[in-house]
Image (spheres, rainbow, N blue to C red):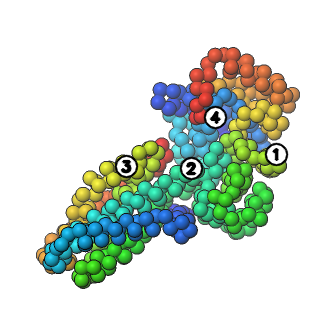
Amino acid sequence: MKPFIGAILAIFWKDLLAERRTREILGTMLVFALTVILVFVFAFDLSVEIRRKAAAGVIWVTLCFAGTISLNRSLTLERDREAINALLLAPVDRTAIFFGKALVNWVYLLITAAIIVPVYALLNNLSLFSWGGLGVILLGTLGYILTGTLLSTLTLQLRARDMLLPVLLFPVIIPLLLACVRASTILLQGGNPAELDTWLVMLVGYDLLFAAVGLLVFDRIIEE
Amino acid sequence: MLNAVNLTRSFGNRQVLRGLSLTVEPAEIVSLVGINGAGKTTLLRVLANLLRPEQGMVRFGSYTPLNAPAEYRRHIGVVMHTSMLYDNLSARENLRFFSRLYQIADSDKRIRQVLEMVALNSRADELVRTFSRGMQQRLAIARALLHDPDLLLLDEPYTGLDQRSSELCEMLIRQAAADGKMVLLTTHDFNQAVAISTRVDLLHDGKISWSSPSAGLSGKSLRATFNELTVFSGSHKGHGVNT
């Protein structure tokens, strides 16, 4: 177990180190996400109440679009000079690559969320923070990244991977997106706690399902 | 000992390896020659556990890629056409990353050692993207040697190297064999193949079609044999395809 965790952390730190130098992934994600938020804020002349109602949808859609940038770029980095082969040659369970990549992409997405949520709240004069909301963001982004890392690995060797990833990813994450938006809306506007529990259980189930799928199939899809 | 038996591998309709068998003994340096597209890189990728053979078995000591894939890979060092390095990390950072993946004890000392072996100590903290092709190749060799593997798989290791670096690479290969390690390398240079190796194998039609100890061979005689078995056989359908 120790080499497995060590490999996940090694991949995580390696990617963060490279990103600290280039800032190409996080920088692009933030610029893109903030632009989308600004478009939503200024393109429509909406009342505060409607903005509050739309907040969950706007934030989750923005995160999903911004997330594809890191998912695409993060694995493309491994494809340059075929560094992915050096990872595959390492004497560790290859699913460590999946979890290492997922971890770094998750951190990028959480940083993006930590910036765009307060910006959206500020621009709309809303209070969006709640511990429950934080939990939904953690669970929702994790599920999104697990799914996305798996699918971006699947498209890694394809020439049209940048275009294919969103086409493959968004239909798969519809249940996740629905659960995230509904749970966030209940937290922001109040609602039936039992219904909130249902969505949270669904999020946990989704995350566990895709972590398990990654564990079972990643070795096979990365090899070929 | 590395033992590959009856390996078969296809890409689409094209069968690249057709029941290939190969053995490499400790302290042996085997040069693999063959026309472009003969399957040299495919064979190395199968031996490195980067590709699954459709049929056949590879064994290194008691390990196979099926029964103990991680242990099998721990004993192998690989240099491919591409450097398999990260451009935005320095040479030292690249090696430190791989030393973590290989769980190397006292990694800083080992990193210094291998950088010294490939004469890159003075450039250790520079980003790989600033390196020339030859320097990247030397660093790729350092990465392959980092975990002190028992088997080295080298795909055209002299590519991009100048005269001095080629000599350095040759010295490292000889040293590895002198230490009892196995070396399997591919090359298109017949003189180099004969000069460095203890055995030359010719890969043709998906099999080792000819094999000879290097002693008594010359570059010229190897070329003559190569031409006789490949060019004049009229079966070099894959010529120009890099597999």
Residue pointed to by mark 4: B40
Three-letter code, disc 4: Lys
Q: Are marks 4 and 1 on the same chain?
A: yes
Give the x, y percent position of residue A187.
20, 77
The residue positioned 52% from the left and 56% from the top of the image is A77
Q: Nearer the viewer, residue A115 or B4?
A: A115
Residue A193 higher or lower than A97, as above or below: below
Residue where numbered disc 3 is placed? A163
Query: Quick one: label 2, few (<14), some, or many (20+) residues within 10 Å?
Result: some
Which quarter of the rendered picture does the C terminus of chain B lie within? top right
Q: Which residue bears the numbered disc 2?
A: A82
Q: Are marks 3 and 2 on the same chain?
A: yes
Which circle marks residue B163 in the picture? Answer: 1
The location of residue B81, given as percent across then percent down, is 64, 44
Q: Is residue B110 visible?
A: no
Badge 3: chain ID? A
**Mark 3 vs mark 4: in front:** 3
Label 1 crowding class (10 Å Cα cut-off): few <14, some 14-19, many 20+?
Answer: few
Q: In the rendered structure, which amino acid carries the disc numbered 1? A: Gln
